[in-house]
Each structure stands twice: as C-alpha cells, then as structure tokens.
Image (tube, coloured by chain):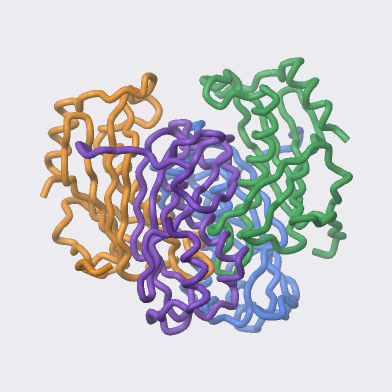
Chain colours: A green, B purple, C orange, D blue
Amino acid sequence: MAEQRVPTTRDEYRVFRTLTTRWLDNDIYGHMNNVVHYSLFDTAVNGWLIEHRLLDIRTSSEIGLVVETGCRYYSELAFPDVVTAGIRVAHIGNSSVRYEVGLFRNDEVRAAADGFFVHVYVDRETRKPVPLAPAFRAALDTLQQ
Amino acid sequence: MAEQRVPTTRDEYRVFRTLTTRWLDNDIYGHMNNVVHYSLFDTAVNGWLIEHRLLDIRTSSEIGLVVETGCRYYSELAFPDVVTAGIRVAHIGNSSVRYEVGLFRNDEVRAAADGFFVHVYVDRETRKPVPLAPAFRAALDTLQQ
Amino acid sequence: MAEQRVPTTRDEYRVFRTLTTRWLDNDIYGHMNNVVHYSLFDTAVNGWLIEHRLLDIRTSSEIGLVVETGCRYYSELAFPDVVTAGIRVAHIGNSSVRYEVGLFRNDEVRAAADGFFVHVYVDRETRKPVPLAPAFRAALDTLQQ
Amino acid sequence: MAEQRVPTTRDEYRVFRTLTTRWLDNDIYGHMNNVVHYSLFDTAVNGWLIEHRLLDIRTSSEIGLVVETGCRYYSELAFPDVVTAGIRVAHIGNSSVRYEVGLFRNDEVRAAADGFFVHVYVDRETRKPVPLAPAFRAALDTLQQ
C-alpha cells in the first residue's frame, strides 16, 4: 500500500472495446463488485480475439488457460456506467501471453481499474502447452506497446 | 409444451436498450445460460428507469421488489452476440408493474427469448407496498402497448 | 397478483440439496437478486443428475436445453444464508421434463421462493430432441410427487 | 512465468469455510472460470467476518473497499466440486488488511488456486479511510500465520 498507485491512461492501450454494465454488477455497497472487473477483462480480450478470427470458442483446438490474474482498483465503477476496456499485450512467451486491460468509466481518461491475466495456450484435449502459432503471435504483436 | 410458442417481434416493444454479452454468459454448452437472460431483463428495465430519473439506486425512498419472473427461450444467444432488449409494460397496478422484455440477437427481428418480471414498489426501509407516484405511472404509461 | 400466492413447503419435495450463498448474490438492496435463484435451480437439479450418474457434463451425448423457466418470490434470501433446495419432477414428456424447485432459507419450512424449469433433451451436436432413455425416465420417476 | 509456482497447502491457513460450486461457475471449457475464484474469496472472508460479528452488511458504519486483488491458478476446479477456502491475514496496516485465501478442491491438500485481496476500511458515507478498531484488529490477529 506504500508503493505508488498510478492509474494507467487511455494512450497506454492499443485497442478498445465498449462494454455495458449490469444491474447485478453493483453489490450492496452500490458499486461494481471487484469480481466483475475480471469478467470484463475476459470479455474484452476474448471478444477481440474472436473478432479477429484468432479464437473460435467451440472449435479451436488450442485454448487459453488462465494461470495468473491481478487487478488494482483506483475509483468506483457502477451500473449504469458504460465501460471502455483498453487492451495491450505486455509479454509474449513461447506458449503464454500476458494481456493487460484498463477499465475506463464513461469518458474518463484515467483508468478506474487496471489489471492483467496470463494465458497459457494448451491443447483443448490434452491440456498440454503448445507453442503459439506464427499468425497468432503476429496478431498479438500489434497489441504490444 | 403443447401450447403455442411464438416469439415476440421487435414491433411489439416500445423502447430498446443495447446490451453487450460477456464471456462468462456462455456455459459449458457454448450458449448463454438461461440465468443470464434475467440479468439482462433487470439491466434493461432499471437502465431505462435510471436514465429517465425514475429511479436513483442509492437514494430512492421506494424500491421495486421482484415477486415473480418468467422466461421462454426460443433460440440460442451466445457471447459475443450483441443483444437488443425491447421493453414494454403489460400491466400497471396500484403498487405493482409487470414489465415484459424481449431479447433480440444481433439484427434478428424475432426474439431469441422473451419474459417478464413483476415489481411491487415498497418503501426501502419498511418494505411495505406504496402506491405508484403519478409521475412514475405517467412514465410507465408510455411503455404500454 | 390477485391470485393466491402460497409458498410450497418442504414436504412437497422429494430430494434436497444444500447450497451456500455468496457475497455477490446480494444486490444493492441487500438481498439475493432475483436472478440468482435460477442459478440455484440449475445447480440443484444438475447436481442431483450428476451425482446419480444421469449426466456427465463433458461427455453426455444428450444435453438438456432450457425452454422455459419461472419463479415466485415470497420472502428475502440473503448472503450469508444457507439455502436448502427441494426438488421434484412435475411432468415427464417424451423428450422433456419439468423440474420444480423450492428454495428454503436456513431452517425455514416454507419456501422463500419456488419455481420451475423445463428441459428438452437434445442431441449435443444436432440439437434435435431425443426421447428420454428408459433408465433416465425411471430415475426421474422417483422425483415425482 | 519463469518464477516458481508452488501451491499453498492447508496447514498454511488458519480458518476454513466450505463453499458449494454452481452450474454457471463452469465456462465453455468445462472448468471454473477464473473470475469465480474471486467471488469465493469475497464470500469466504466476509462470511467469517459476519459470523464473528465484525461486519454487519447493512449497518456497519465502516466498510472494506477492495483496492487490489490477485490469484494464481494451479489446477482446475469445476462444478460440482466442493471447495474449502482457507483464510489467513498477511498484513494489518493502519486502515488496511491483506487477506490471503487458498481454494482446495474436495479433499485435496494442495491449493487449486490461491490469492489475496487488500481491503481499505472506509467510512460508508464519506468513503475516507478510517483506522481499524482495536477489537477488529485483535480478531484479525488470530488469522495471522
């Protein structure tokens, strides 16, 4: 808690997705529960992958397993806010990718929260890691800062 | 099951809200789980009420308690579909309202699912029913078919 | 709303499942949001089916698609309540089943809410209805009142 | 990813809560979605606080705002698993607490996932940080390793 906590800003992300909030996102304290942010991370990144034909939920032979996630919360989001999710790729390994996502409230420039998740790509059946395909890696390169 | 099951169409609703789907809306069968539809009902109607200053989540002295809900499912919705929710009011009682909502997949004209919920308006503290305020009733009238 | 609203009681159900509530079940009004009840319905019935080896989530060639659901809410549930779900089967058709579920708060005898869902069993790939297998039908018979 | 990833074990936690999983916890990949783990963290810790009368959801004048969360995933959880959540307190500051939680699948001794969240305690109305009350601090001390 002593360390610096500086929200990321929109210019630090490469692509953006607009996401609507839901009534049940608000918990008893009247703001978006900390759990929901992770649902928005998943939705933003996988939405981008699907739109760019890099993931087919039902048929892809490789799937991304989440091995680590984290989030910092700077200010409150709440239904009925509209959230813009900014996406960037921070690291591309042999079979893993670290995605970073910032969540921006309505027109705000500083993130209300930002976080990451690490995907390890595995064979859907054997769940063993597989190297990232060259086309997939090339697409992810465009999301690097 | 023997009765007719005819999806409602867009022209049967009065106002519309655009809602984004989420990765976790899909269950293991690869489609939106039947539970999520109700979350979209709540979101659509309360979003409209808030936008029209008929509900302030944190301060309204009256709140709507849900006493009955129902939904019929005609065809699958799935992330990353965009859903348009059509809203209408089917009945306005002394202290209750029956909202009906149709969920439309992307550009489709026939509902993928349609359903309802009945709100009884109560005092936030005592949870006793209260008569609908005239201004609230007038606003709901505009949603009647 | 004019009709009778009488909660079901524990003796009207055949089998029971104990379910824990979660922090996020409570919405801003401090009680379990109406959506969550349906998640408990799914969980109770599918949990029973899996335990009795009538459903294997990953491998069953037939899956139950939900075509209709409904719920009546009589009194509030809230985290950290423990919920007991009572299950019964109200109708067994050629390829469909109507499950009815009552949700009981802690030690209460009258349901806080009760509802139903109708499953149509379909082939996982073609999504065409299939007749219920005799062993499955026999197991469901034990849940009839 | 190069660093060591060693799951925590049951003996590293001080108190335990039993939590049931739900149908919708499983995403399309047939395992508990990474988001759900955080819902279990919230549920375990707040459940313990409520049971020990350290938190009253509706009336406490101080509430815990989450400022940071994180989780590591070692192996899959899935409905209908029963999850045991182990809880410990890793740090107690002036107005903040770092809770750590391990999620154990059925009877397993090594965590399927472990993570943390940091609560800053604030006044419910002003949302300004407040020092931890001595009785609260004393209770949290019992959760330290």
Quarter-of-image position of residue A85: top right
* Residue visible at 84% across and 59% down in the picture: A5
Residue C99 located left or right of residue D16: left
* In the image, residue D108 above or below residue B142: above
Residue C102 visible to an observer of this rendering: yes
Q: Quadrant of the N terminus of chain A?
A: bottom right
Residue B62 located left or right of residue B127: right
Numbered marks: total = 0
* Residue visible at 41% across and 54% down in the picture: B100
Q: Quadrant of the C terminus of chain A?
A: top right
- Residue A144 in the image: x percent, y percent? 85, 32
B75 vs A127, nearest the viewer? B75
C107 vs C88, nearest the viewer? C88
* Residue visible at 45% across and 68% down in the picture: C31
- Residue D61 in the image: x percent, y percent? 61, 82
C45 vs D134, nearest the viewer? C45
- Residue B29 in the image: x percent, y percent? 43, 31
Residue C81 visible to an observer of this rendering: no
* In the image, residue B27 above or below residue A105: above
- Residue B126 in the image: x percent, y percent? 42, 84
* In the image, residue D139 above or below residue B23: below
